[in-house]
Image (spheres, rainbow, N blue to C red):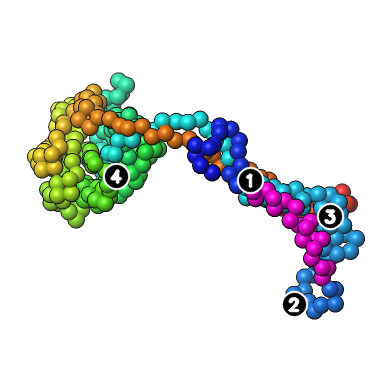
Amino acid sequence: MAEDALTTGFTIAWPWLLLLAPLPWILRILMPASSTGDLQALRVPWFSDVAGGKAGWMRRPWLALVATLVWLLLVVAAARPQWVGEIESLPVTGRDLLLAVDISGSMDTQDMILNKSAVNRLKVVKKVAGEFIQRRHGDRVGLVLFGSRAYLQTPLTFDTETTATLLEESEIGLAGRETAIGDAIGLAVKRLRDDAASDRVLVLLTDGANTSGEVQPLQAAEFAARDGLTVYTVGVGADEMMVQDFFGSRVVNPSADLDEDTLRSIADRTGGRYFRARDAEGLEKIYEILDELEPVESDVEIIRPVDELFYWPMGLAYVLALLAALVSIRPFSLRLASS
């Protein structure tokens, strides 16, 4: 059925299948009765409980009614009942954007403030980056998580809400305790290499240096530049943090391991920019700048959501058939009669 022919509300995708409803009765009339003298290829001890004698399946009117209802429900399910929603406008930019987030052990450092409470770095990243993802309507957005190894958490999709949810569900150490920056870039290059999008962007966020993986970060940056992938790098972590030890309170630099030179070189080689986020407010401003650098300017594609409803009649048919089968079994029926 053509999309422009659909009307809002309940509809049947394949209404011609409803013509199959009288098929069992037609076959019963046209086909000759089977001979009772034929040899049996398979002996079924409980056959009389469901087919023969006074207690046969079709000898019980209510079981015949259930069988009829089950068949009709299956025919309705096969005809694909649907609910057609209102027409919606979907912006499309032709841009593919991957977000690579560090979930190594160092992201558990509690040097960030969120809602006046000290939280770890990943908690702030989840909030700020999640809001950034949800603003990218019209982009295909994907999510790469990396620690000692990198893996694709979400493939490129227009479903920004689901991508943000999967970022929120990520946990520190899930991909190992070390940091494989080069592998994260390499995975992004591999995933975006065959895409036909006009703009391909990677936003990589980390709080450390490359300590794991098979690909060096600058080598991966060369691959990205060769394939036209723009990489924006973000270094996250405070410059000062008060800690308690045996000698009392002292100020330390929790971001001493952050390799800013490498992150800056990665951005320069791929035509991107390097940003430094020392607190939650700074990270929010960085993602606002990214919105300006990679604006969501798009054409509009008209879509009409269609929800399939076939599982409702199919599920009801299954339940009715199961109940009828249980009641038809002789021991079960005898227990019901004696109770």
- Using the numbered discs, state the Cα–Cα distance from disc 4 to disc 1 in whole angstroms: 44 Å
Q: Nearer the viewer, residue 291 or 197?
A: 197
- Using the numbered discs, state the Cα–Cα distance from disc 4 to disc 3 in whole angstroms: 58 Å
Q: Nearer the viewer, mark 4 or mark 1?
A: 1
Could you say which disc has been placed on residue 144 in the image? 4
Q: Nearer the viewer, mark 1 or mark 2?
A: 1
Under mark 4, the amino acid is: Val
Would residue 36 be seen by someone viewing this image from the given angle? yes
Q: Nearer the viewer, mark 1 or mark 3?
A: 1
In the rendered image, residue 109 lying in the magenta stretch gets the answer no
Q: Which residue is mark 3?
A: 333
Q: Which element carries disc 4, helix, strand or loop?
A: strand
Would residue 124 be seen by someone viewing this image from the given angle? no
Residue 216 point in image, percent of width and height: 14, 51
**Magenta part of the chain:** 16-34
First in sequence: mark 3 or mark 2? 2
Q: Which element carries disc 3, helix, strand or loop?
A: helix
Q: Nearer the viewer, residue 23 or 145?
A: 23
Q: Which residue is mark 2?
A: 41
Q: Nearer the viewer, residue 235 or 18?
A: 18
Q: Give the vertical position of 134 relative to 39 (above or below).
A: above
Crowdedness of circle 1 by 10 Å Cα count: few (<14), some, many (20+)? some
Please say if the residues under marks 4 and 1 sit with CB atoms less than 8 Å apart.
Answer: no
Q: Nearer the viewer, mark 3 or mark 2?
A: 2
Under mark 1, the amino acid is: Pro
